[in-house]
Amino acid sequence: MIVIYTPDHKGHAPVHEIYRGERVPSFEKPDRLVIIYDALKDRGHEIINPTADSLAIIEEVHSARYINFLKTAWDTWVSIDPENEHIQPFPSVWPVRTLRSDNEPLNFIAQLGLYSMDNGTPIDRGTWTAAKAAGDAVITGAQMLHNGVHSVFCAVRPPGHHAGYDYMGGYCFINNAAIAARKLQQSGCKRVCIFDIDFHHGNGTQDIFYESPDVLYVSIHGDPKTEFPFFSGYSDEKGLGDGYGYNLNIPLAAGTTSHQWFEAFRSAISFITRYKPDAVVVSLGLDTFEGDPISKFSLLSEDFIKIGRDLHTMNTPTIFVLEGGYAVKELGTNVTNVIDGFENH
Ligand code: OKP
Ligand code: ZN
């Protein structure tokens, strides 16, 4: 399978995230993609650099003020004090419910809160460059699909599916799957499906297309009653207005077995098949793996071959967009298994 990859992701390497109130080493780190890149290369997949510029579509999917903040955030942070170069900023105040989010404060930490859903999405010197490069990769992939390629794999980070129109969160800044879907629409696909099989619900993707019948969002994920992002991902979220019926959430309890997961997966596939999409964007998280350190499903490495095989039965042009997956050692095998299953069905 053609793989789209750029080393620009390495500039996004925040050292810590906050866990139980303490700073712990970041789970979402460059090593994840280094391992995946090596495995893809070993298996002989053709790896190309992005050739497209995603900025115009990023500007359609995300708000102008949020993009402007992201682009300038690190320089602003360091301009406050040169010592900040070595310190990670974290938000500490958020405009929840009745507080005002129309007004952008001048204080940097307050701005960070305005544009964040959590305190778990650290910004680094190279964050904008990495996030933009991931966007370039998926736009390149969407163009290839338009030119008749049946499937591409976008090996990108940081991930995207928690990022909404106006905010970052859950390690995500720019919604890669959403911009892939927009690009596919613009190149003539009337019906696009985003199939999100990351362990976590893609609240950002859901938000962006919640009123759109022309982009079907289907997600299988850990039940938000107990799992991040907690405030989105319930089965009664079905879309709004013309988009009603075009959002399908399948929350599964922590501890769901591989057998139960595949039951949900196959019913999602038949739902998607009835929609008759012109293209499918797979938000591919590998954090459904049993060894994942932050997730609670129990797929085995060989299950990822089955995932690829079953996705291929939809017989629809498919763009894979990497989301989560934090069991770094097994990530290369798990990713290449999905591709092998898809190609060798
Ligand atoms: C991103 B993706 C764990 C804190 C949880 C949020 C998880 C984001 C997952 N220490 N932080 O969907 O894989
Ligand atoms: Zn995830």
Image (cartoon, grey):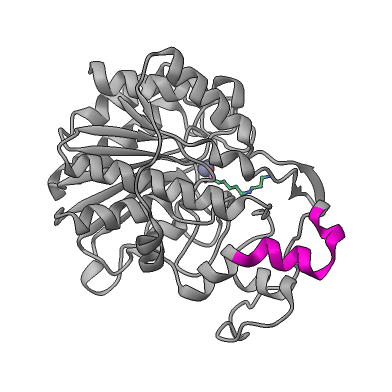
Principal secondary structure, stretch drawn in magenta: helix
Viewer can see residue 335: yes
- Between 83 and 23, the one nearer to me in the picture: 83
Specify start and end residues of the magenta stretch as a single range: 72-85
Q: Is residue 317 left or right of residue 89?
A: left
Q: Is residue 190 left or right of residue 85?
A: left
Residue 294 locus on image (x, y percent): 63, 38
Q: Is residue 10 left or right of residue 336?
A: right
State the residue at coordinates (32%, 18%).
340
Viewer can see residue 116: no
State the residue at coordinates (33%, 66%).
210
State the residue at coordinates (36%, 67%).
60
Residue 120 locus on image (x, y percent): 67, 54
Quadrant assignment for the C terminus: top left
Q: Residue furthest front?
A: 51
Choose top left, top right, bottom left or bottom right for residue 214. bottom left
Quick check: is 74 in the magenta stretch?
A: yes
Quadrant assignment for the N terminus: top left
On screen, residue 111 above or below 186: below
Quick check: is 228 in the magenta stretch?
A: no
Residue 240 locus on image (x, y percent): 29, 71
Residue 239 locus on image (x, y percent): 30, 66
Choose top left, top right, bottom left or bottom right for residue 314. top left
